Image: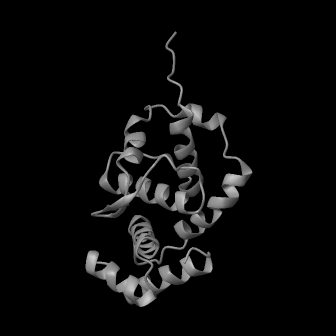
């Protein structure tokens, strides 16, 4: 009989968060998949999920944690064990707004780019304490491709309505 590897709680918690938000299992097969993992993790942490073991700093695609990436790469190929667990209601309550962000991507931007924009904007505000105009200006300077006024204002408004800024 082949013994299936068990998922440690350190890996299970981020996995359950990702699955709750995206309704998918994470994968590390593409850059966009890894980017999605990072942004969901960062935003979940900002909404109060207990991910304090992971320190996010600014990198090319915004908030990034090497340790959080390590979790993704160390997940077993078979994630069937995950279905035996559920997030606690208190965690779901905290990260429910993240699901709203995920589902509110404007039709002309991919969900992963939307999460990158929202996470990057939030990171800039939290790290630098800037107002809206200065934050968006900094975002565009660091990431010139995020130059869509509608997207930037929508992301700002969403973060503001969710009480994050």
Q: Tell me residue 18's x, y (percent).
A: 53, 51
**Relative vertical location of residue 125 with respect to residue 26 in this rendering, above or below:** below
Q: Quadrant of residue 93?
A: bottom right
Indicate left or right for 28 with 17 as reference.
left
x, y percentage for residue 74?
Answer: 40, 35
- The answer to which of 83 and 65 lies nearer the viewer is 65
Q: Position of residue 69 (x, y in %)?
A: 37, 46
The location of residue 111, given as percent across then percent down, is 44, 67
In the foreground, 91 or 125: 125
Q: Is residue 4 above or below residue 163?
A: above
> Measuring 45% from the left and 76% from the top, which residue is drawn there?
125
| Residue at 40 percent of width and 56 percent of height | 56
Residue 36 placement: quadrant: bottom left
Side (left or right) of 79 relative to 30: right
Quarter of the figure that contains the C terminus? bottom right
Determine the residue located farthest toward the top in the rendered image: 1
Colouring = one colour
> Would residue 38 appear left or right of 159 to someone viewing this image?
left
Q: Is residue 80 above or below residue 22?
A: above
In the image as oriented, which residue stretches furthest toward the right?
A: 89
Between 33 and 10, the one nearer to me in the picture: 10
């Amino acid at each position: 009989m082949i013994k299936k590897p068990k998922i440690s709680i350190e890996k299970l918690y981020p996995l359950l968060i990702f699955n709750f938000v995206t309704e998918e299992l994470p994968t590390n097969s593409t850059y966009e998949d890894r980017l999605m993992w990072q942004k969901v993790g960062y935003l979940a942490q900002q909404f109060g999920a207990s991910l304090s073991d992971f320190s996010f700093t600014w990198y090319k695609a915004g908030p990034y944690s090497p340790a959080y990436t390590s979790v993704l790469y160390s997940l077993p190929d078979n994630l069937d064990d995950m279905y035996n667990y559920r997030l606690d209601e208190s965690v779901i309550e905290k990260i429910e707004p993240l699901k709203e962000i995920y589902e509110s991507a404007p039709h002309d931007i991919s969900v992963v780019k939307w999460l990158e924009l929202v996470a990057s904007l939030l990171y800039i505000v939290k790290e630098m304490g800037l107002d809206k105009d200065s934050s968006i200006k900094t975002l565009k300077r660091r990431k010139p491709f995020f130059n869509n006024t509608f997207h930037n204002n929508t992301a700002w408004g969403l973060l503001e309505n969710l009480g994050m800024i």
